[in-house]
Amino acid sequence: MEKQPLAQLTKISSQVRRDILRMVHAVQSGHPGASLGCTEFFVALYFNQMKHDSSFNMDGVGEDLFFLSNGHISPVWYSVLARSGYFSVEEMKTFRKLNSRLQGHPATEEHLPGVRIASGSLGQGLSAAIGAAQVKKLNQDDRLVYVLMGDGEQQEGQVWEAAMYGAHYGVDNLIATIDFNRQQIDGPTKDVMDLKDLKAKWEAFGWEVVETVEGNNMEAVLAGLEKAKSLTGKGKPVLNLLHTEMGYGVDFMVGTHKWHGIAPSDEQLANALGQLEETLGDY
């Protein structure tokens, strides 16, 4: 896909946020909070950073690959996939409905273009991404593999097994990102199980770490991803520690775990949409 300039990325982000809210509201089910918080990251990745083809080949030879580990934030991914041509924008109307390809957590049974693994069981995505990255190395494919994890997900033991493995085997064609919004379903991460210094932990496990402090600023997100790419191919996997705000873009949703998995009412939807410009046309 052709790289989009900053101004267009900002417009796409506004529309993606509208899509997220409308999908979740329509079925009164889903996870808007972290979807809104990760919008800049997804838009930057799919519309500027990754080499990818919306015609979609499951093997992804010669393309950058993306894996979503925290699969509950499927609304933002579905919006970005649709808006970048993987399937019809109209299909977002089927989100979380019976027999839809757009299930609450991404699935592969219905062969939705763009989705390579079923996800939602937290802790598994990094392992899958490392495997894909090693396959690219074996096939002498020089493209990169990306994976997104949640910060609450760092409480899963499998993440740290995979972290050890990736560093030990020098999987340096991999960029893992943590959505560091400091919130999870039961409350702030510091109260549920404090993550302490994640940057120091990942460095201690042998990873190069890039810290993107303004994860809802498109320029900063792009700069962080470019920095991460510059560190690939040097013997270590790369981690992008992306500071975001859950619910970003909607004033009554921002910065709280309460919108982790709650759908807005009719009145709340109207309020939220009033804060977001319709830039590409609602579905």
Image (cartoon, rainbow, N blue to C red):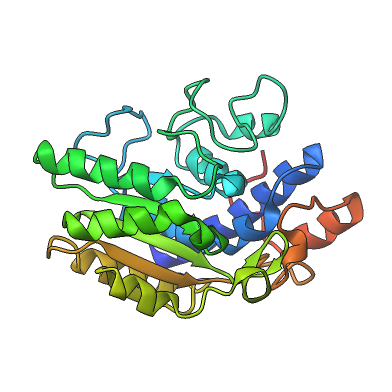
- Name the one closer to the observer, 81 or 146: 146
Does 152 sit above or below residue 55?
below
- Name the one closer to the observer, 161 or 170: 161
Residue ID at (22%, 60%): 167
Question: Looking at the rendering, which quadrant does residue 128 occupy?
Answer: top left
Question: Looking at the rendering, which quadrant does residue 251 occupy?
Answer: bottom right
Q: Position of residue 234 (x, y in %)?
A: 12, 65
For the C terminus, give its image quadrant: top right
How many numbered dots are placed on residues in this image? 0
Does 22 sit above or below residue 153?
above
Q: Position of residue 97 (x, y in %)?
A: 72, 27
Give the farthest residue toward the left.
140
Q: Position of residue 64 (x, y in %)?
A: 27, 45
Q: Position of residue 21 (x, y in %)?
A: 72, 51
Does 89 sit above or below residue 179?
above
Residue ID at (48%, 26%): 108
Does residue 275 appear anywhere in the picture?
A: no
Side of 77 where 261 appears, left or right: right
Side of 45 where 78 appears, left or right: right
